Image (cartoon, rainbow, N blue to C red):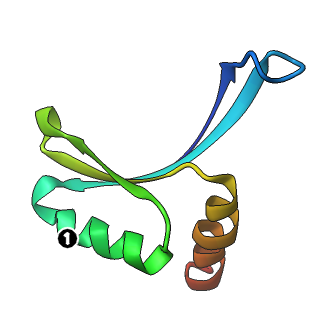
Amino acid sequence: MFFVSISKSSTTKLGETVILKFHIAQHSRDSDLIKSLINNFECGRIELNLEKSAVYLVVTKFKDITDKIITFFDKYLKV
């Protein structure tokens, strides 16, 4: 899933910043899959949600989203 949010920021002229986020959720038993995605994409981090027994691949760096994640979708998911 791709997310776009706007947050308040004291370091920008307009006082707001845009945050981009890509994440994939899996059951916590599939953490090796998430680790392999991180290795293949060479970006991202793991986040755990123990209440939901979930593990997430999370990518927030703009350059990684545009150069690695979107490029992957463009290359392999043409419809």
Q: Position of residue 53 (x, y in %)?
A: 12, 44
Quadrant of image for the C terminus: bottom right
The answer to whether 74 appears left or right of 39 in the picture is right
The answer to whether 74 appears left or right of 38 in the picture is right
How many other residues sit within 10 Å of disc 1, few (<14), some (14-19) or many (≥20)?
A: few
Nearer the observer, 79 or 66? 66
Q: Position of residue 14 (x, y in %)?
A: 87, 18
Can residue 1 be seen by looking at this rendering? Answer: no
Nearer the observer, 22 or 1? 22
Q: How many marks?
A: 1
The residue that appears at 49% across and 75% down in the rendered structure is 41
Can residue 77 be seen by looking at this rendering? Answer: yes
Q: Position of residue 68 (x, y in %)?
A: 61, 72
Residue 39 vs 17, above or below: the answer is below
Residue 70 vs 14, above or below: the answer is below
Secondary structure under the numbered disc 1 in the rendered image: helix
The residue that appears at 74% across and 28% down in the rendered structure is 17
Nearer the observer, 28 or 46? 46
The residue that appears at 61% across and 53% down in the rendered structure is 61
Q: Residue furthest right?
A: 13
Query: Where, by quadrant of the figure, is residue 10 drawn?
Result: top right
The residue that appears at 65% across and 21% down in the rendered structure is 7
Q: Position of residue 59 (x, y in %)?
A: 50, 54
- Under mark 1, the amino acid is Asp
Residue 51 vs 22, above or below: the answer is above
Q: Residue furthest front?
A: 11
Query: Where, by quadrant of the figure, is residue 6 drawn?
Result: top right
The answer to whether 61 appears left or right of 66 in the picture is left
In the picture of the structure, the residue carrying the numbered disc 1 is: 32
